[in-house]
DNA sequence: CTAGGGTTAG
């Protein structure tokens, strides 16, 4: 039996021990050896084949050698170290060998190594080609190495490859990941022939620097061109844009596109969908998608837990969290932010404290500033002001304005001027000068009848030219969004709205509502205060929606700032009197008013 | 004669 036929029988263990003598046989061996190589299914098997080839003295055939490296570097079971050791034995590696090694290193995230190989290649006078650049660019993008990326871009020009579509895509990604979005756009715009990958890259790049509006514009441009159909990755970026822009209508359109074009949505897409629905107010839709997911991962659990949290459904959030642990998924810091904020929004003090302990001691996560923020919030809302303050003082990281602001607003709710002053002072010390914080402090002084301090704060505000951003409420009706500010008279139906307010007021009184003026900051008499309170933006928006939308339909309102206590109570009454579900979204969470109660259980 | 190119969520 000749040795070649033994080889053809495919088992390397039957390789002969005597190397063939003639060069013709040697060449034949390479063909057989190669097919053998390619059939390897594990590193173990591969090493044995390799040993045999070495023993047969056939290694230095460059074709076979290259394939050895390629197989070892690129297959799923490959080992980069081993590939490297073979690579280093090749006397004159060419661009194929370097490309292979660079790619293998990028795949296994040895990014610096990949770049070093690229440099070595240049030093040895080996010309990188159109397959080299996409990989080294990817290494730069994963490293966020803008400086190196720019250099490589220069090399691309020198090599005359700036028109290669794959190189261009690589450049767009590299610039995008390094945050140099203008450069990414320049490359993109200069492309003659854009591929779907180019669109995906440029849209993803805009998403990664949070240019949400541009994301959606680009998607529009792409569809307008009509040459490429949006694929999953693009739509994930677009969904994320909708979520951040709070644009549920557009989000629903994208859901439609997905359903029409893609048969089975992947985990990433479903996760973005859930996030979009939940953050734009449709918790139920989000839950529905979540429950229909065959496989879930950390991301999916995070969005649903965070979603339940912002809707005030703390208990359910905790139960989903325990499902997650039961599934064997390890929680990370982000999931815990969701869990803790769920506790804080729902007033689950003991559970929150317990989770904070588990996070540190069971799951060995170092609490971040956000976790501390949640805990301060949790304790503060529950009236444990001293505890919250002590926690801040004991933090191993420097507290930021967000943490102090949580404490400040807790002090406002629980009327603790002493700690409130400390909190405010610390915010100002961080060079944060938000009119809102000054006003909260002024309000607390006013309540304590410390008029001199009120005046002092007001002068300070004037000196710093701080003007409070006016609160507004957005409401959807007749497929349009209408904006109301307090005391708004700019709407054409203004009179009807104010008449409606009168009518509502009458009914409210009948049901036992009394205006709560404690949060009106203006220095005016009681009558004037009462008058002002009546026409807060949210009330105008509700009146408008009651007139404009069909009976029994849900009213959705978005606000830029928290609503005052009075608007909260008022809306509860309206929900029962007019039999409407009303959803109000403020900066942090959703309030669902129904049958006279709010999902936040007056705890927000 | 060889391998190979982009991207996705909290």
Image (spheres, coloured by chain):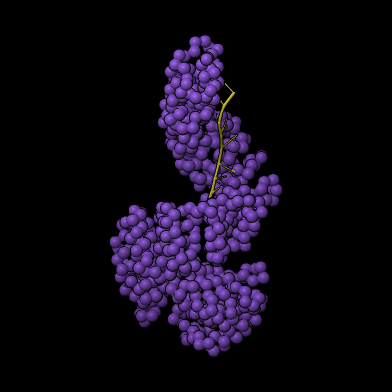
Which residue, as the protein is rendered here, is positioned at the far bottom?
A510
Look at the image and tell me whether residue A453 can be seen. no
Task: Tell me the residue at 49%/58% (across/down).
Answer: A303
Residue A393 location in percent, x, y? 30, 63
Left or right of residue A456: residue A37? right
Task: Tell me the residue at 57%/87% (across/down).
Answer: A507
The quadrant in which the C terminus of chain A is found is bottom left
- Chain that is coloured yellow in the picture: B
Task: Tell me the residue at 65%/81% (across/down).
Answer: A496
| Residue A505 picture quarter | bottom right
- Chain that is coloured purple in the picture: A
Left or right of residue A329: residue A585? right
Q: In the image shown, does A14 or A462 lie closer to the viewer?
A: A14
Q: In the image shown, does B10 or A127 lie closer to the viewer?
A: B10
Which residue, as the protein is rendered here, is positioned at the far top?
A22
Residue A581 to residue A170: above or below: below
Task: Tell me the residue at 55%/81% (across/down).
Answer: A576
Residue A447 to residue A261: above or below: below
Residue A428 location in percent, x, y? 38, 65
Residue A564 location in percent, x, y? 48, 76
């Amino acid at each position: 039996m000749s040795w070649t036929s033994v080889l053809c029988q495919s088992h390397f263990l039957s390789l002969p021990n005597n190397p063939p003598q003639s060069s013709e046989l040697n060449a034949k061996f390479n063909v057989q050896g190669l097919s053998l190589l390619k059939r390897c299914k594990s590193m173990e098997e591969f090493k044995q084949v390799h040993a045999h080839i070495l023993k047969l003295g056939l290694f230095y055939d460059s074709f076979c050698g290259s394939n050895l490296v390629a197989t070892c570097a690129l297959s799923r079971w490959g080992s980069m170290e081993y590939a490297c050791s073979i690579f280093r034995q090749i006397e004159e590696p060419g661009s194929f060998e370097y490309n292979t090694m660079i790619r293998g290193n990028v795949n296994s995230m040895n990014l610096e190594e990949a770049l070093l190989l690229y440099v070595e290649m240049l030093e040895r006078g080996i010309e990188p080609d159109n397959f080299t650049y996409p990989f080294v660019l990817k290494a730069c993008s994963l490293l966020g190495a803008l400086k190196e990326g720019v250099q490589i871009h220069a090399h691309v020009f020198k090599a005359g490859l700036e028109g290669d579509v794959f190189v261009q895509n690589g450049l767009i990604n590299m610039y995008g990941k390094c945050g140099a979005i203008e450069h990414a756009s320049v490359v993109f715009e200069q492309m003659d022939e854009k591929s779907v990958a180019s669109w995906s890259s440029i849209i993803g790049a805009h998403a990664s620097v949070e240019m949400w509006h541009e994301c959606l514009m680009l998607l529009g441009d792409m569809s307008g061109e009509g040459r490429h159909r949006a694929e999953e990755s693009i739509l994930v970026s677009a969904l994320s844009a909708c979520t951040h822009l709070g644009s549920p209508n557009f989000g629903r359109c994208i859901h439609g596109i997905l359903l029409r074009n893609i048969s089975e949505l992947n985990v990433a897409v479903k996760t973005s969908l859930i996030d979009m629905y939940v953050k734009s107010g449709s918790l139920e839709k989000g839950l529905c998608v979540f429950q229909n997911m065959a496989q879930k991962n950390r991301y999916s659990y995070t969005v649903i837990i965070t979603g339940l949290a912002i809707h005030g459904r703390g208990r359910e959030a905790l139960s989903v969290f325990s499902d997650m642990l039961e599934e064997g998924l390890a929680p990370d810091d982000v999931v815990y932010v969701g869990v803790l904020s769920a506790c804080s929004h729902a007033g689950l003090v003991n559970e929150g404290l317990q989770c904070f302990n588990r996070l540190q001691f069971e799951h060995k996560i170092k609490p971040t500033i956000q976790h501390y923020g949640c805990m301060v919030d949790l304790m503060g809302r529950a009236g444990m002001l001293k505890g919250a303050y002590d926690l801040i003082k004991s933090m191993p990281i420097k507290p930021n304005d967000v943490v102090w602001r949580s404490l400040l607003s807790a002090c406002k709710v629980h009327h603790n001027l002493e700690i409130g002053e400390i909190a405010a002072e610390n915010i100002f010390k961080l060079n944060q000068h938000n009119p809102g914080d000054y006003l909260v402090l002024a309000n607390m002084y006013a309540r304590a009848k410390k008029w001199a301090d009120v005046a002092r704060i007001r002068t300070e505000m004037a000196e710093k030219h701080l003007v409070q951003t006016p609160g507004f409420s957005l409401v959807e009706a007749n497929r349009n969004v209408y904006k109301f500010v307090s005391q708004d008279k700019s709407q054409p139906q203004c009179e009807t709205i104010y008449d409606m307010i009168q009518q509502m007021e009458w009914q409210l009184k009948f049901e036992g509502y009394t205006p709560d003026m404690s949060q009106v900051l203006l220095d005016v008499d009681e009558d004037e205060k009462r008058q002002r309170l009546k026409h807060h933006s949210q009330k105008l928006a509700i009146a408008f929606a009651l007139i404009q939308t069909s009976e029994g339909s849900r009213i959705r309102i978005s606000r830029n700032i928290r609503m005052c206590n009075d608007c909260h109570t008022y809306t509860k009454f309206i929900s029962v009197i007019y039999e409407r579900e009303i959803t109000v979204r403020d900066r942090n969470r959703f309030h669902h008013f129904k049958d006279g109660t709010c999902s936040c259980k007056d705890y927000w």
